Image (cartoon, rainbow, N blue to C red):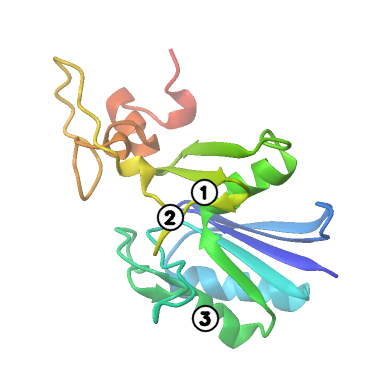
Amino acid sequence: MILGSIEAGGTKFVCATGTADGKVDKQVRIPTGTPDETIPAVIKFFQDNPVDAIGIGTFGPADIDPASPTYGYITSTPKPGWRDYNFLGAMKAAIDVPYAFTTDVNEAGYAEWRAGAGKGHKNMLYWTVGTGIGAGYVHDGKLLQGFSNPEMGHIMMPQLPGDTYKGRCPYHANHCLEGLAAGPAVEERAGKKRHRAGP
């Protein structure tokens, strides 16, 4: 069985094919533009490289509740063009295979629990810091989620005394972890790109 995967990030999509044992056969990186720019390139990759099933891990917020009428949608994201976008529906309309759909942090966290740093442990919390901040929590072998995954990047975070940074979160400004410390906030604070923002 050949499996496909999509890591849909705020900056880039990484699409790959491989086998259940973790061997990657082919991989491509596609810049995250608008859906009309990005999704056709994703679809073409899988049309050129047929698979038996596809797993999608997407930036969010996203509706990951299979019982919801908007399951598979990217919902209230501030990313231009993606708000209320039926991501899973667009893929299903073009590539007729079984799908699994969750958030990018759930996808990565579960992979680490199964085959990486969390292998052999009962529970594991996975954090990522990039365009946003997010976390996936595996508890007793299952991802912690309700109608969505916990938006741990948006936990309230008081600023240090004397820190006057206004924050980058479109919802909470400087009142949450993501608004104070995600990649764009680090760049803005440092006045330079992240890879150059060291000491």
Name the image quarter holding the N terminus.
bottom right
Q: Mark 3 points at which residue?
A: 90
Along the horizontal axis of the image, is 44 left or right of 131?
Answer: right
User: What residue is shown with label 1?
Assistant: 105
| Badge 2 vs badge 1, beta-carbon distance below 8 Å | yes
Q: Earlier in the sequence, mark 2 or mark 1?
A: 1
The residue shown at (31%, 26%) is 191
Q: Which of marks 1 and 3 is in front?
A: 1
For the residue carrying disc 1, how many other residues have a C-alpha within 10 Å: few (<14), some (14-19), or many (20+)? many
Q: Earlier in the sequence, mark 2 or mark 3?
A: 3
Is residue 19 depicted above or below 198 in this figure?
Answer: below
Instruction: Identify residue for label 2.
Output: 149
- Return the disc, 1 or 3, that comes first in the chain's sequence: 3
- Crowdedness of circle 3 by 10 Å Cα count: few (<14), some, many (20+)? some
Q: Dot 3: what SS?
A: helix
Q: Evaluate if marks 1 and 3 touch, with contact meaning CB atoms under 8 Å apart.
A: no
The numbered disc on residue 36 is none
Residue 136, given in percent of the width and then of the height, sits at: 50, 46
- Residue 197: image location, x then y, percent: 42, 23
Q: Distance between the residues labelled 2 and 3?
A: 22 Å
Measuring from the top left, give residue 106's x and y in whole percent.
Answer: 54, 52
Residue closer to the observer: 174 or 26: 174
Up/down of 97 relative to 38, above or below: below
